[in-house]
Every structure is written in structure tokens, then in C-alpha cells.
Image (tube, helix red, strand yellow):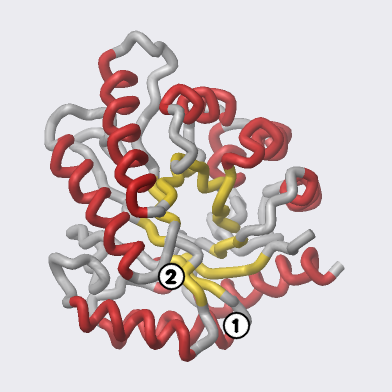
């Protein structure tokens, strides 16, 4: 069975307003030992992005792909995180919805152009009551994006968040499109649930998991370096192996660590210990 690999979510190292910044981030990831990177792919006010077609050119994107290949890196996925008026993602909010749908579809197109096949995002807040208008709105908007992904060969992966793994899995089943998957982040589940739930969610979502983020949660230091917090790594890695997951563990750290490169290096060494065992 193929083994998992270690990558880096590049926004951990800051924004990518130009090719030079993106190149430097990819160089750092490669120097640490990562075999893949996950860049940001939409331009938003707080995070300028050269890979967004509204910012960078086709030549910029070709150069980014060339640099990745020269460093021996692949793109594990891309992040197309948008925001509604109220929620992170906003695919359940009516105001501005069509723009967010179209922007996400554009991100899927750009991903295909860059040779990738996964786009991740937090879609929004999934209501518990399926009869709520917001639930039906999210069902339709996510379904439309997943259908576009199916046409161009790009998976749309919803990141685990405040809803339970069971609720997320049921929602994906209701959409009913095999190109709709999960980006699993155990720390999101740990923060809003339990240690056991972060592990059990792997079994609940199973082969829906196509990409993962690797970070820790330390409520005392507020840092996210893997192995230095409360994440149940033994059980979590064991669960991923049990379901046959052979994708990426993409190191992510949004805490503003004063020495992010060193922190990523410690996370890499910690995760490598599992893969080398």
C-alpha cells in the first residue's frame, strides 16, 4: 500500500503577491523536505495571490508550475477560500452568492491549468436542519461547483469544521457527486469537538477524504507545531492508515509563529517519524 506524503500549505509562509514570493515559499518547503505544496489560488483583500487570473498572467502561472517542477514539488491541491457577509465561505448565504460560485469555478479551472486536481475550502456553516433555506442554498451552490469540477477533472474538497463528520458526510452523500470530497483537518474537529471525534471522523468519512491539513492545537501557547499540542496523532495517523489513505499531510500554521520556518521544520520531522516507523 502506498504511504502518505508530507507537504506544506504555503499560506503558512505568508501571502504570494508575485511569482518571486511564491518561488521563495516553494524553495523553503523543498529545503525542509516536503514533496508537495498547496498554494492559495484566489485573490482576496487580506491575502493577495499571483495565481488568481484576475491578478497574474498565464505566463506567471506557467512559471510557477515550472519552478515547482524544477524543485521536485507537486501541487497537492489549491485553496480557494472566500468569505460571505457573515460566514467563512458563504456558500449558504444568498447575498453575493453567484459571484462566490463563479469565483470558485474559476479556481477549479486555474487548478486544471496548473496541472492540479484538488481545490479545498470551508464552504460555510452547514445548518443542522435540512429544511432551513441556508441548507438548501448550500446544497445547490456546492452541487453546482462539484458538477463543474466533474466536467474538468478537479475535485472540490470541503474542509472539516464546526459541523460533525457525520453531518458533513451526509451532506456530501446528498449532493451525490463523486467529485465532491473532504479536506480533513483533525484540529478543527478537536477544537470544536473531542479527541475521540477527531479520530472517529476519519472512519466516518473514509474514502471521501482526499487531502488533509496537518497542524496541532495548543491552547496554552496558541501555537500549531505538530506534536506540540493536543492533537491525538497516534490514533489519527493509525486511522488514516486503516482507511487506506495515501495522500498528503499538508503542514498548515496560521498562528503567526515568530519563526515559522523552524516550526514547519519541527512539524515535518515529527510527521516524518510516523512515516519512517
Viewport quadrant of the C terminus: bottom right
Query: Residue under circle 1?
Result: 32
Q: Residues within 10 Å of mark 2 (few under 14, many from 20)?
A: many
Q: How crowded is mark 1: few (under 14 residues within 10 Å), some or many (20 or more)?
A: some
Q: Residue at x 46, y 84 (%)?
A: 69
Q: Residue at x 14, y 43 (%)?
A: 99
Numbered mark located on residue 87 in the image = none
Q: Earlier in the sequence, mark 2 or mark 1?
A: 2
Looking at the image, residue 207 lies above or below residue 154: above
Q: Does residue 44 appear left or right of residue 24 in this picture?
A: left
Q: Which residue is drawn at 34% across and 53% down?
A: 152
Q: Residue at x 36, y 40 (%)?
A: 146
Q: How many marks?
A: 2
Whole-percent x, y for residue 126 in the image: 39, 26
Label 2, label 1: how far apart the Cα atoms are: 13 Å
Q: What element carries label 2?
A: helix
Q: What element carries label 1?
A: helix
Looking at the image, residue 275 lies above or below residue 35: above
Whole-percent x, y for residue 52 in the image: 22, 66
Quadrant of residue 197 in the image?
A: top right
Quadrant of residue 26 in the image?
A: bottom left
Looking at the image, residue 103 lies above or below residue 18: above
Query: Residue under circle 2?
Result: 10
Amino acid at each position: 500500500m502506498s504511504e502518505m506524503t508530507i507537504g506544506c500549505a504555503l499560506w503558512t509562509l505568508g501571502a504570494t503577491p508575485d511569482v518571486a514570493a511564491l518561488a521563495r515559499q516553494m524553495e523553503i518547503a523543498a529545503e525542509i523536505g516536503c514533496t508537495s505544496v498547496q498554494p492559495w489560488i484566489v485573490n482576496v483583500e487580506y491575502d493577495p495571490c499571483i495565481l488568481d487570473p484576475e491578478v497574474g498572467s498565464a505566463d506567471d502561472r506557467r512559471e510557477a508550475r515550472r519552478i515547482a517542477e524544477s524543485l521536485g514539488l507537486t501541487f497537492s491541491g489549491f485553496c480557494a477560500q472566500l468569505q460571505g457577509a457573515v460566514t467563512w465561505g458563504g456558500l449558504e448565504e444568498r447575498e453575493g452568492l453567484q459571484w462566490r460560485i463563479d469565483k470558485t469555478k474559476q479556481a477549479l479551472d486555474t487548478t486544471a491549468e496548473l496541472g492540479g486536481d484538488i481545490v479545498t475550502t470551508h464552504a460555510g456553516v452547514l445548518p443542522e436542519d435540512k429544511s432551513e433555506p441556508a441548507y438548501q442554498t448550500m446544497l445547490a451552490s456546492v452541487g453546482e461547483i462539484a458538477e463543474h469540477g466533474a466536467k474538468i477533472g478537479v475535485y472540490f474538497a470541503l474542509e472539516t469544521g464546526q459541523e460533525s463528520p457525520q453531518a458533513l458526510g451526509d451532506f456530501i452523500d446528498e449532493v451525490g457527486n463523486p467529485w465532491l470530497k473532504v479536506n480533513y483537518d483533525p484540529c478543527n474537529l478537536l477544537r470544536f469537538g473531542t479527541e475521540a471525534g477527531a479520530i472517529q471522523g476519519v472512519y466516518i468519512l473514509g474514502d471521501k477524504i482526499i487531502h488533509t491539513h496537518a497542524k496541532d492545537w495548543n491552547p496554552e501557547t496558541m501555537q500549531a507545531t505538530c506534536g506540540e499540542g493536543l492533537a491525538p496523532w497516534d490514533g489519527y495517523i493509525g486511522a488514516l492508515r486503516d482507511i487506506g489513505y495515501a495522500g498528503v499531510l499538508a503542514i498548515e500554521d496560521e498562528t503567526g509563529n515568530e519563526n515559522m520556518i523552524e516550526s514547519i521544520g519541527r512539524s515535518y520531522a515529527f510527521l516524518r517519524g510516523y512515516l519512517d516507523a
